[in-house]
Amino acid sequence: MRRSGHAAQIAPSAQDSLKKTSRFQVASTVTVTDDPTKIVCAPQASEINVDGDIAQVRDKYESVMEIIRREYLRQHSDPWVVAYSGGKDSTLLLQMTWEMLTSLSSVDRKREIHIVGNDTLVESPLVIRHLRKTLAAIATAAISCNLPVKTHITKPHVDQTFWVNVIGRGYIPPTRNFRWCTDRMKILPTNQLLQTIVRIHKRAVLLVGTRKSESANRRRNMEKREVSGSNMNPHSSIEGCSMFAPLADFEDRDVWLVLMQRKPPWGGTHRDLITLYRNGGGGECPLVLSKEDAPSCGTTSPRFGCWTCTVVNKDRSLRGLIDSGHEDADVFECLFDFREWLIELREDDRNRQRVRRNGEVKLRADGTPVMGPFTLEVRKQILVQLQVLEAETGKELISRSELEVIYDIWRRDQVSEDCRMALHDAAISGI
């Protein structure tokens, strides 16, 4: 795997001069220019008419705040679950939920609010660092403010992590047609938590930051399910769980304008978030909660997701962080190269078995075989190189628990292979 240095200078941090306002108004320091410290981090920011948009966004913001407040004050105790990925949309949703909650008297804060993030264990390093830092600040602030807020980070079961499936079972790195990762690493862990909450409280409301303007595919899915910013929709797979998308009609620029105007109520600033987007050049991979949401994970847009993601042809967000001259650019370069190497392994049929994991051989219409998992030798090679990568980056990339599961799978696969070979030899001897 190649290693290369970069001479690019570290991009300047976003300015702290954007003042916190008690009402939504335009800060005098906000202008739209080509200056990378300003609103250019937002898509199409150069086209924003600040004075006109501020008034429009203020009305939209206040309208959504009233809807969120009204829904929370309904006469039942169903807990809320806020899906938080660490990106701009879920950050705004969380911020508006928090501001609504603190605007109420302590007597009216009756319903629990669970803030749920997801760690696939192969997240982009900066994204998971930001998510963990933010959730820690939220947990501390919730205690200080005596708010009924709890934070959670879901993870895949050790038997279903990326490395256990790739190195252990020999699954090829995900493709658009074989995206095995989303279910195992995102949907199942988070849905298990949702099911637990529903089991305890009988019902729950899941708040998501999805917006119709994210993509044409997102708009079609939301319109098909009649999702709007003011009504509840049943969860596609969890009985007793309703979904609420207050930001459904927000545009990208609406989200950015609000975040640029208002500091996070749990403390700190949005500077890290803004810098992350500016340097990476894109958006986060969302907290996927259903198969309908899965297409957003691994799209061609420059999203921040798993550093191992091979659904996209090129990881433009990680490449953007490298090219920005980030202080960890050398580490990101190593991760980027390893991901490219995984793709090369996947595309070479010589690295894969002809027999699938279920013992079957499948042929295409032209008689060519549908290749199975990586050979045991290739899986062992990947593990060796991953451990080399750990030494190079100084980061733990695979846990001891994962290694134990992998070694167990290898032992069972070796027994199966030995049995197949013995049967093959017996059949030949009998001819």
Image (cartoon, rainbow, N blue to C red):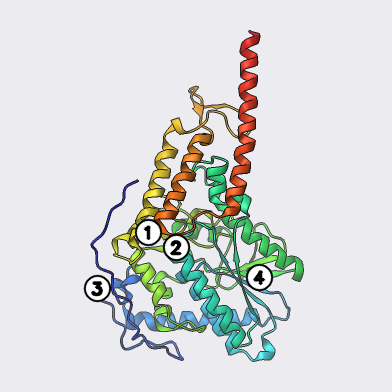
369 vs 304: above or below: above
**Quadrant hosting residue 207:** bottom right
Q: Viewer-proximal residue, 54 or 149?
A: 149
**SS of the residue under disc 3:** loop
**Residue 261 in sight here:** yes
**Quadrant hosting residue 341:** top left
Which amino acid does the dot numbered 2 rest on?
Answer: Pro
Q: Which residue is mark 4?
A: 205
Question: Which of pointers 4 and 2 lies earlier in the amino acid sequence?
Answer: 2
Tell me if mark 3 has few (under 14), some (14-19) or many (20+) residues whose alpha carbon lies within 10 angstroms of its own.
Answer: few
Marks 1 and 4, how far apart in space?
40 Å
Residue in the image at 62% along x and 37% along y? 411
Which amino acid does the dot numbered 3 rest on?
Answer: Asp
Q: Which residue is mark 1?
A: 331
Evaluate if marks 3 and 1 touch, with contact meaning CB atoms under 8 Å apart: no
35 vs 178: above or below: below
Question: Which of pointers 3 and 1 lies earlier in the amino acid sequence?
Answer: 3
74 vs 358: above or below: below
Question: Which of pointers 2 and 3 lies earlier in the amino acid sequence?
Answer: 3
Marks 4 and 2, how far apart in space?
30 Å
> In this image, 129 relative to 271: left or right?
right
